[in-house]
Image: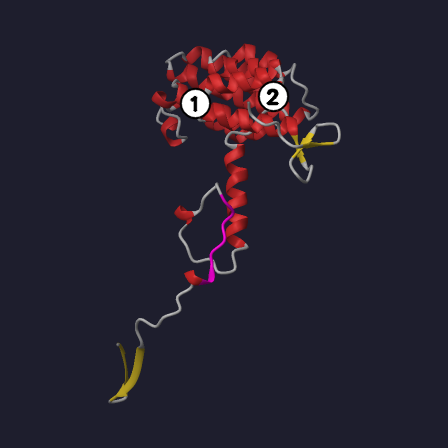
Amino acid sequence: MARPLFSQGDGERVGSKGVIKKHEFVKIITRALYSLGYDRTGDLLQEESGIQLHPSAVSLFMQQVMDGKWDESLSTLHTIDLADESIVKSASFLILEQKFLELLNEGKLMEALSTLRNEIVPLSTNMGRVHELAASIISPSQTVVLGLSSRDNSSANSRSRFLEKLQKLLPAAVMIPERRLEHLVEQALDMQRFNCVFHNTFDSELSLLSDHQCGRNQIPSQTLQVIHVCLVQDALVWYWS
């Protein structure tokens, strides 16, 4: 049986210094498991810990985005506890933009135009982008200029990238950022490297299994070559020996 994490006080914090919130710690581990493709393990961790990665409304919202259910995702967005209305408006714009682009790439010009006129324009935000979207109806080549190829916008990969774009907009407390654990680990390695007084090794040799510290013996201490400089006919000559 695995040993429980060391906790302090009411058990809501873990680690020897008591600065890590347990529920956040478990959430970023769960997020990392899903990112690595260990979906069953992620599900099991949520079940065993009783700590859900996202509230049910957020999970539903994310699934609706991945399924391309744009109208439903907009409705769900408004049920998520977001205090900043500007974030709700910006997220709504992104969702409707994706809806518009997929309709356009499927050749449904009238439906795309209706989405632009009746849903996107009334938001009264990012009008410069609205003009670009309108131009893409008149000139299909404009979608290429905007990086909006038909092949990309209807694919699952495109929706995954779009969901990551939404995640950057929404507060981290609402939707855990992608690769958050990796980012924290990289920060720790960067700090160890910065604090290494005798640092003289490649990044590929850094390990997560122990703290990094270069020894004095890794600093060159023997002379292998000597650079000589001499003046020959008013010109400096450099050579090694």
Give whichever of 104, 29 is nearer the camera. 29
On screen, residue 6 above or below 152:
below
Q: Name the residue under label 1.
A: 37
Q: Is residue 91 above or below residue 56?
A: below
Residue that appears at 61% across and 19% down: 49
| Residue that lies at the very extreme toward the right in this rendered image | 9
In the displayed image of the protein, which residue is found farthest to the bottom?
A: 233
Judge from the rendering whether residue 116 lies leftward or rightward of residue 136; answer left or right.
Answer: right
Q: Residues within 10 Å of mark 2 (few under 14, many from 20)?
A: few
The first of marks 2 and 1 along the sequence is 1
**Residue at the image position 43 percent from the left and 14 percent from the top:** 103
- Taking depth in this image into account, of 137 and 40 the one nearest to the observer is 40
Q: Is residue 100 magenta?
A: no
- Secondary structure under tag 2 reads helix
Q: Which segment is the magenta one?
A: 210-216
Left or right of 12 in this view: 29: left
Where residue 123 is drawn, which disc sits there?
2
Q: In which quarter of the image is residue 170?
A: top right
Overall secondary structure of the magenta section:
loop
User: Residue 131's spot in the image, x, y percent?
Assistant: 49, 27
Please state which amino acid type lies under the numbered disc 2: Leu
Residue 231 percent location from the top left of the image: 28, 87
The mark closer to the camera, 2 or 1, is: 1
